[in-house]
């Protein structure tokens, strides 16, 4: 049984196209999407339509929440608040009412049981869409923040920096970002879980996409924060 987990598309439909092609080539059985579908990218509506076409389980990310109700004070640095809400308003204007309603009703987490394996998947932490748990945190902190429900494998997103760790006989992984990688590698990231009778293999897959074309899309669409977003794409860092 092959499972693919992807997240943090951020309106980058070109990157999502590349990832879905790679997933198809690997004969994946099921796909799961862990949020942040539309916000901060040049193709929010097409990104969501691609996700909907998968007919798969999807959960909410912080950026999906922002699209629905705006970015609030205290959720981002104060100096970024005004611009991020301008971005949010642009994204909102590109989506139809059905899309907004879809984002609003998404659940917060997933409990998956496949081939005798239990997986708990969420966007940032099981209790928050916004809390940041980076790769270098201590085993104790990761245990307390992420491993709150019984599972064999814990999968999350949000930080745009993929990693895999093993703590107390359990696997914890971050799947990185499809649309906006922050780890210096200008390639989309997603997770592939291959479950067999003898165990499982967890891996991070990196997929190239046409960054130049996406950067041009930011300019052509008159995206409100195009220069900053292009810089992130060029460097794969914030």
Image (cartoon, grey):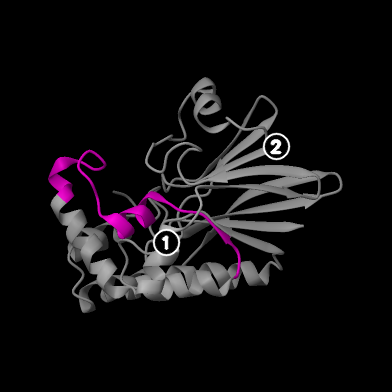
In which quadrant will I find the N terminus?
bottom right
Taking the view exactly as shown, the residue that stands out farthest to the right is 197
- Asked if 104 appears above or below 129 in the picture, the reply is below
Q: Is residue 73 magenta?
A: yes
Crowding near pointer 2: few (<14 within 10 Å), some, many (20+)? some
Residue receiving disc 2 = 152
Q: CA distance from mark 1 to mark 2?
A: 28 Å
- Where is residue 92 shown, x and y percent of the image? 28, 67
- Specify the segment rendered in magenta: 55-81
Label 2 sits on a secondary structure element that is: loop
- Where is residue 23 shown, x and y percent of the image? 62, 67
Q: In the image, what residue occupies the spot 54% across and 23% down?
A: 139
Left or right: residue 148 versus residue 225 is right
Taking the view exactly as shown, the residue that stands out farthest to the top is 140
- Asked if 55 appears above or below 142 in the picture, the reply is below
Left or right: residue 52 versus residue 43 is right
Label 1 sits on a secondary structure element that is: helix
Indicate which disc residue 103 carries.
Answer: 1
Q: Quadrant of residue 121?
A: top right
Q: In the image, what residue occupies the spot 21% across and 74% down?
A: 219
Q: Is residue 234 magenta?
A: no
Left or right: residue 152 versus residue 190 is right
Q: Nearer the viewer, residue 87 or 164?
A: 87
> Can the viewer see residue 92?
yes
Q: Nearer the viewer, residue 152 or 161?
A: 152
Which one is closest to the eye, mark 1 or mark 2? Answer: 1
Q: Mark 1 or mark 2: name the one nearer the start of the chain.
A: 1
């Amino acid at each position: 049984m092959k499972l693919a987990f992807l997240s943090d598309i951020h309106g980058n439909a070109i990157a999502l196209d590349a990832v879905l092609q790679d997933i198809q080539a690997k004969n994946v059985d099921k796909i799961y999407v862990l949020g942040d579908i539309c916000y901060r990218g040049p193709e929010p509506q097409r990104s969501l339509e691609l996700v909907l076409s998968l007919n798969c389980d999807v959960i909410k990310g912080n950026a999906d929440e922002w699209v629905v109700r705006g970015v609030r004070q205290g959720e981002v640095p104060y100096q970024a608040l005004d611009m991020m809400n301008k971005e949010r308003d642009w994204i909102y204007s590109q989506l139809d009412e059905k899309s907004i309603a879809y984002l609003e009703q998404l659940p917060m987490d997933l409990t998956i049981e496949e081939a005798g394996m239990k997986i708990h998947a969420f966007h940032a932490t099981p209790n928050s869409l916004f809390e940041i748990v980076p790769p270098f945190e201590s085993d104790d902190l990761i245990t307390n923040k992420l491993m709150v429900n019984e599972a064999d494998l814990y999968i999350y997103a949000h930080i745009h920096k993929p990693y895999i760790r093993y703590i107390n006989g359990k696997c914890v992984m971050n799947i990185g970002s499809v649309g906006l990688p922050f780890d210096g590698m200008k390639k989309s990231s997603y997770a592939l879980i291959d479950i067999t009778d003898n165990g499982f293999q967890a891996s991070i897959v990196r997929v190239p996409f046409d960054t130049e074309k996406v950067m041009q899309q930011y300019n052509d669409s008159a995206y409100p924060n195009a220069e900053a977003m292009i810089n992130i794409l060029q460097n794969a860092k914030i």
